[in-house]
Amino acid sequence: MRVLIVDDDESVRRGVRTLLSLTTDDVSICGEAADGTEAIAKTVEVKPDVVLMDVRMPGMNGLEATRDIRRLAPKTQIIVLSNYEIPQARQEALNAGAVDYVAKSEIWTRLMPSLRRLSPEAAPNGDTPTGPDSPGESGDKPRDLKARLRESEERFRATFEQSAVGMAHVANDGRWLRANRKLCEMLGYTQAEMQSLTLQDVVYSKDVLAEFEQARKLSSGKIEHYSTEQRYIRKDGGIVPVRLTVNAVRNPNGKLKFCVRVLEDVSVARQKAMHALDVANGYMALLTNRMSAALTRCSRDLRYLWVNENYAKWMERPVEKIVGQRILDVFGLEAFRTLRPRFEHVLRGQDIMYKEKVTYSGIGLRHISAVYAPTKDWLGRADGWIAMVEDITAPKKGGQLRPE
């Protein structure tokens, strides 16, 4: 079975990928999409057997996309994934053409059974398949229903405990209700010890306020999930950096029951990334310091990450007085105001070329020709840019051009 995953939150897509990889060999992921419009295009392109469709997405939402996919690709079946556990939401999804509706809080227990009830040939006209939640089995014997519930719970426990990432259920007041084996190993506590702690006991002190603010938004219903990076304190006092994803689980009235937290230890990955970055910077310095062009790399928060020697000579500052500094402090206010629209442009992910007269602090009015290319983070978002700058200022009579 070929599956297309659609969700605007990359962490949710990653969680679904993890679940499918842990629990079955019969499903292959043929693509991903981040909104309804992209989902339609991907469906037409890769022709999946099943689409796992989020509801709330920017632009075209999941129900609108479901209707269009049912029209354009009637053999593709759609399972809607949603943060809401209410009958009305389920009925709207089925009316739009979905064959099933799974609350995100129940993904680990209900998604695989839902997929197993489907096949590429089943329900081509959008009919709802029979299953534990469908009218076709309303006459099941209590013994059969208990068996299904027991099987579902056993499957959940196995997946929860065997997950390669830390997973936990946390109460609205911050108490750890349940923690899997991986999370306990990550933090050095037993499962019993975890249940005696609160978030404030293990979240690094400087991250606690931000955590409480997000928890307040979850509790009030302003948000349904969030992703961030946090630091956690091990039992032995060590610090563990994690990539955190939190999803709300609500009752039918919308009140928060608990939160599902997924924690991925990024310490090893970060060490490898830093080593790779050091190697890459070494090669870049070796190559670019032999070039006549002035080159630099800047970050999304408008700071210098790296410059070559020619850039430092052009700015008439040593390299160590530029790298790590704010562009504003190196350029001066007038030059920064002139070029800030260029920075904002490249941070939207677009290459730019321009010529501009700029008055810099320390070196005065210069006429420059520049090329910017965005750099991308692991989610494909612009996290900075690389710039090549040429000084094309006309030389004073009898003088020389400044170094490029």
Image: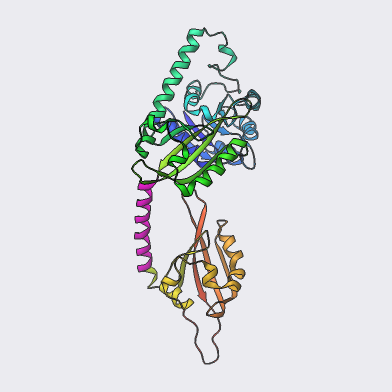
**Is 69 left, or right, of 301 in this rendering?**
right
Q: Residue at x 35, y 64 (%)?
A: 283
Asked which colour scheme the image uses, the reply is: rainbow
Above or below residue 168? Residue 115 is: above
Provide residue 90's location: percent of width, then percent of height.
62, 25
Q: Residue furthest bottom?
A: 398
Provide residue 119's location: percent of width, then percent of height.
50, 23
Provide residue 363's location: percent of width, then percent of height.
53, 80
Residue 25 visible, this orientation: no
Provide residue 99's location: percent of width, then percent of height.
58, 24
Which of the 4 image quarters holds residue 59?
top right
State the residue in front, 72 or 6.
Answer: 6
Query: Is the magenta region chiefly helix, strand or loop?
Result: helix
Q: Residue at x 56, y 33 (%)?
A: 53
Based on the picture, tell me whether residue 360 belongs to the magenta stretch: no
State the residue in front, 170 or 159.
Answer: 170
Q: In this picture, which residue range is highlighted in magenta?
A: 266-286
Above or below residue 248? Residue 371 is: below
State the residue in front, 219 or 315.
Answer: 219
Residue 282 visible, this orientation: yes
Based on the picture, tell me whether residue 272 belongs to the magenta stretch: yes
How many marks can you see?
0
Q: Residue at x 40, y 33 (%)?
A: 194
